[in-house]
Amino acid sequence: MSSTEQADPTADRPTMRSFFEGLRYEVLPFKGVDAKVLEHVPKDVKLTVTASPGKGIWRTIDFATNLAGEGYAVVPHLSSRMIKDEAELRDIIAKVTEVGITEVFVVGGDAPEPAGKFTGSPQLIRALEELDHPFTDVGITGYPEGHADVSDDRLDADMREKAKVATYVATQMCFDPKAILTWARGLKSGGMNAPVWVGIPGEVSREKLLRISAGIGLGASARFLKKQQSMFWRFLTPGGYSPDKIIKGLAPQVGAADHNIAGLHVFTFNELEKTETWRKRMLDKYAG
């Protein structure tokens, strides 16, 4: 390991190593990506599968169940605005539980118009509860830097309602370790004790980001770039983006008692080989 690769001496090495052993990769259910998963991602890395309005909720479900059949622990995203009603939700539950999937991640979704009665994640969370769902874990989204289209008060109210059922929170992408830590501490001091998975981009190039943006369709692409402007501009700055900078900021506080940060939720943008190479490098960095 070179001198520039030395782990932060203030970090707890075993805890940091467990971060990279137990992280999860978010993948987009695009054609051919399942083969890339099989080639580059070890079976002990949990996968979450996004839902895109352009692809439909059943693309997510089929992709997730196929990967589960290959032996991965898989978490399909249930996009509230892409599910018509309780009947379709029951069909989804039946399909994923048939292959042993025990966890789902509930999001509002980017569909400009809801497919049916669910207009946001709180409604879908309530429906899951009313259906006496079989899942051992239900994840929800957190927003350390707020949401472009939703007030902070509304986000807080929705979070508290969803937290009655959810078992963990995974954050949207955030590049500011201080903002992440402040937000996570606020959750805990406010009485919310669910584990927090910090959402960060993996090793993703600017070119890959632009290709992904183009591939999800014009309308969805525009919404994506609106939501992720900070990420987009980070890729345009000199030196570009590296997840190492976020890790360096978080590392000294990982394992502290004043927050519930439990691990990393890595947005791979399907850059699986590069992201897995980065994970292995970080495992080596915090070894010993």
Image: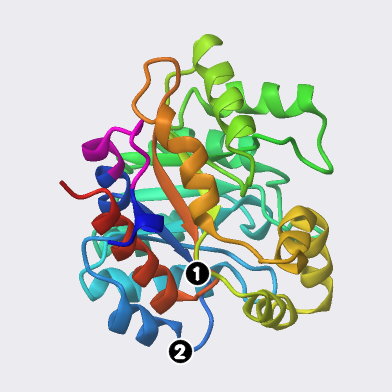
Magenta residues, start to end:
7-16
Quadrant of the rendering where the N terminus is positioned: bottom left
Residue 119 sits above or below residue 73 on the image: above
Q: Does the magenta stretch include residue 83?
A: no
| x and y, in percent, of residue 191 in the image | 50, 10
In the picture of the structure, the residue carrying the numbered disc 2 is: 32
Q: Quadrant of residue 99?
A: bottom left
Task: Report the residue at 66% width, 48% height from top.
Answer: 108
Task: Name, please, the residue furthest toward the left.
Answer: 288
Q: Could you tell whether 79 is left or right of 5 in the image? A: right
Callout 1, which amino acid? Thr
SS assignment at label 1? helix
Task: Report the residue at 30% width, 73% height from top.
Answer: 41
Could you say which disc has been placed on residue 28 in the image?
Answer: none
In the picture of the structure, the residue carrying the numbered disc 1 is: 60
Q: Are marks 1 and 2 in contact (CB under 8 Å)?
A: no
Callout 2, which amino acid? Gly
Report whether residue 195 is seen. no
Residue 49 sits above or below residue 114 on the image: below
Q: Could you tell whether 243 is left or right of 101 in the image? A: right
Q: Quadrant of residue 251?
A: top left
**In-front residue for pair 78/186:** 186
| x and y, in percent, of residue 193 in the image | 43, 19
3D distance between C-alphas at marks 1 and 2: 14 Å
